[in-house]
Each structure stands twice: as structure tokens, then as C-alpha cells.
Amino acid sequence: MKLVIGIVRPEKANDVLEALYRAQVRGVSMSRVQGHGGELERVETYRGTTVKMGLAEKVRFEIAVSDDFVQPTVDALCEGARTGAVGDGKIFVLPLDQAVRIRTGETDHGAVTPVDK
Amino acid sequence: VSVVALLAAVPQVDTGDTAWMLVATALVLMMTPALGLFYAGLVRSKNTLNTFMMCIAAIAVAMVTWALVGYSLAFDGTSSLIGGLDYVGLHGVDFAPREGTTIPHLVFMAFQATFCIITVALVSGAVVERMRFSAFLVFAALWSVLVYAVLAHWAFGGGWLAAGGTLDFAGGVPVEMASGFSALAAALVVGTRKDYGRQALLPHNAVYVLLGAGLLWFGWFGFNGGSGFSTGNNSVLAFTNTLLTPACSLVTWFVLDLIRGRKVTAIGAATAIIVGCVLITPAGGYISPGWAMALGFLGALPCYAMIVWRPRTRVDETLDVLAAHGIAGFTGILFIGFVAQIGWNGVSDGLFYGNAAQLGDQALAALAAPVYAFLATFVLLKLIGAVMPLRASEHEEALGMDVVQHGEEAYVTGEGAILVVPEDGGGAPVPVADPG
């Protein structure tokens, strides 16, 4: 069981979601974050004030998956988020100690497996 | 006695009419930033400023072209196709009353300028979220002269439609049908947005949309109420009808929304206000308040149908200018031909009151204006596109037009922003992480 964290461009977030759904990965959280990797700063001007935007808008996906799903999830993130230019983002895979589905009390594998209605 | 008769024959400026027209002009100018707000709410947040700026740009560009040449081509002389050049650079446009009115020529010109401005801004709704700003500026300058001024001459300036008896109170021809059918042409030439039809591209702020619609309605009282150039009966009628028709369109829209989705939507309501105002624009001073209400109830139907149908096509006419302005203007122009009443307008009856010829005159305008607007805009954009790229690259479109075209964001937080200190500004520059 792993927690996959993907930090991607906001304009690629929809493509990532599409790729995840195609890979049958359905339990996803996403949030808007600001971060700085290797990309060049954007220069913006507001009246007389010119600033370098050191932090870029990113979208952070958090996906808890069973071991079989780690590689498909990572592949989907790469496929959906890649443009080839600096700033495409990062993927981190972390070990996950425990997962609990609040509604049923199921733990671990049962908790990260989507329910089919 | 002869002196008195002579004085009576000389056209006089009326102070009351002039006072109202000064206010009406300001009201109509306000409609363009209001449209900017309305449009900005309908696009994604990364395109907020660019969308708003297209409307602001219309004020800059169209006001200048109007003063230089547009006004003259629209309102100098009564030749059938295009006006003359006597008023180029506003030469001879002064305090004397404009022919056929009791207001100074300058006020008349200013009032008509605000119409040209908002019409240019309306067309931008077809191409937001992907058209390059500089290409839009060039398009706006040429369109305001080659399309707006020509159609304004036909309908308002004594051109062939006006001379032939077409009734168009406040701009069904040059404003509503011109912008709507030009928008269709512009959407076809500029092309669809990158993710159109594949991903949901949703409005980002419905409150802007409602507020923009409300301000547009407020401004429309100057637009329609001022188009009689006086405080006379036609103006009073148009003013009051501008209250009635959109309210009735709202009712129709609520019912259709309820039938279709079991919920009344806010963006639908904002759209209904615009549709109602457009419907009554050509007809305002010509039809009775009762028929104005009927126009609001009935005229909303084809516009609603178009707004439901258009997104299912491959035509990314993004903000539905064709439905809200083209179709509504078309409907309003034709409606006059059925229900005009000489008892209300002092000019002509429609088909229901025994004058079938009026419907013919209206149908002619409803055919000619869309054809000219569509073809002229299509050719114009093809020509501009041959000289410069019309749209941003896919990458730029993905980033958003605000950052790419303007170097600004609508909802900037300032977090992580590092001040760029001018070289002689004293103090060491703040170190910036260099991945180098």
C-alpha cells in the first residue's frame, strides 16, 4: 500500500484526471498548491511594481493505492502531466502504514479499493 | 411676423432633450465595462483579465476609429450604401442641432459612438480564451469601420434599409444582428478552443455574470430610451418597454430551466436579461407595452433553443453572442413587422394592424444584415489571419491568456512574488533561486 503524490501543472490537471480514470484509479484528492521547482520565474507588472513570481501554481494529487496499482498510477500521472518543458512537476511514492474507510471501518486493502455499486 | 416664422423654421436645440441624451450617452458607455464583467464571469479564471480587456480595448479602438472616419461613413448624407467623408475627424460636428433632432450634433455623435463601442465589444465573446490580444485590436479597428459603420448607415444614417421603410429603433440591425452573425463568422475563422468538446470549460464566477447583466440592463435604459433622441413619446415607450420585455424573458427562461433541469439557474437568468433587452432593442419605440411583454415571453424561446443546441456542435462561439444577440435581434426586428401600431409609434402599422408591407421591410433587414455581417467579418478575419496569427499557441492557451497576453493575473495572491528592484533603486536585489 502506497501513497502516491503527484505535483503537476494546473493546466494539465484535467489530462491527469482523464489518464487516472482510464487506468481505473478512482480514489483521488487534489488541491491547489504553490511551489517552486526548477522553472524560470514569470515576470508580472502591476502599475509601477514589477515582480518575479517565484512560486508557480501547481495542483497536488494524493492517491492511496494498493501495491498492484502503484505503477499504473505513476504511469497515468506521467502521461497526463508531461509537456516536456521545465516545470512539469514531480511524483513521490511514500509507504502507507494504514488506511481506514470511515463509513465501514474497513482497513488497508479494502479501504483503498473503490466500491463498485 | 416674418422674423417669427423664420425663427420657428430654424432648428433649435432643446435643453430637456439634450440633458437626457447626455445622461443616456453615459449610461450606454457604462454598458461596455458591464459587458466586460458579464463576459469575464463566463470564462475560466485564467482568462478573466483578457476577456475584460477586450471590452476595454473596444472603447479605446472604436472611439478613435469612430471619431476619425466611422461616424462620417455612418451619418454623413443619405446615399444608399455608405455615408460620405464630410465629418472625417469630426469636422463640422458642433453645437448646432443634428438634422432631424433637437440635440447638438456633438451629443448625437457621442451617443452613436457608444453604440459602435459596445458592438465591437460584443463580438469579442465569440473568440475569448484563445484569440491574441494584438490581433483583436487590429480586428476591432477594421470591423468598427467596415461592418459597424456600414450597417449603422443602412439602418440609422438614411441608407437603403432606413429609406426603404425598415423600422429599427435602437439597433437590431447594426448592433444585435451585426454582432451576433459576425460572432459566428469569427468563431469559425479563429477556431475552437483547444479542449472544446473534450473537457468541461465552465464559467468561473456566476456573481460577475449576474452583476454584469444587471448593469447592462441599467445601461440599456439609456440605449433604448435615448434612441428617440428626445424625451418624447417614442423614448418614453422604449424606456418602459425596456423594463417589461426582459422581465417577461426571465419568466420564460425560469419555466424552460424548470422543465429542462428542474432547477432555475443563475447564469440562465443573467442570459435571459440580456436576451430580453436585445429583443426590445429594435422594437422599443414602435410596439405597445402589451406586445412588448409578448415579445419577452415568446422571443426568449428561439434564443433558449439556440443556447441549448450550440454547445453540441463543433462551433465554439464561446459566449453565445449569436443566440443572445443575433437570434434575439432577428426576432425583435421581425416582430415589429407583425405588431407595430401607428397609435403607439406615430410611424407605421404592422401586419396585424393591416400593413403587410411593413413585415416585408423588416424581413429584408433580417436577411440583409446577417448576410453582410457574416460575410464581411469572415473575409476580414481571413485577411488579418494572412498577415498575423489570430490565436495563441496551445501552450499559451493552456497557461491562460491573462499571464501570456497581459503579464497579470486576476486573482494574484502575491505569495512568492519577489520585488524586482530598479537598478538605481538602492539596496541589494533580493536573491532569486537560480536552478542554473
Image (cartoon, coloured by chain):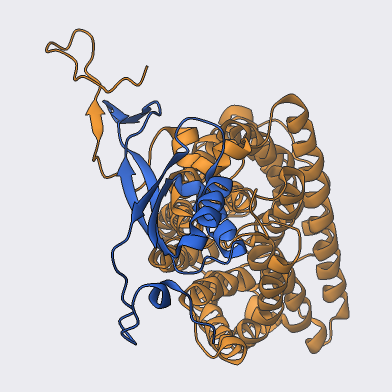
Chain colours: A blue, B orange
Q: Is residue B213 left or right of residue B138?
A: left
Nearer-the-camera pick, A109 or B340: A109
In this view, B320 is above or below B244: above
In this view, B33 is above or below A107: above
> Residue pushed farthest top?
B424
Residue B201 location (% of width, % of height): 56, 59
Residue B434 location (% of width, % of height): 31, 19
User: Could you tell me which residue is drawn at 55 percent across and 56 percent down?
Assistant: A72
Q: Is residue B72 left or right of residue A100?
A: right
**Residue B97 in view, yes or no:** no
Task: Locate residue B150: give its quadrant.
Answer: top right
Q: Quadrant of the C terminus of chain A?
A: bottom right
**Residue B370 in view, yes or no:** yes
Task: Locate residue B215: give its quadrant.
Answer: bottom left
Residue B325 location (% of width, % of height): 65, 64
Nearer-the-camera pick, A110 or B276: A110
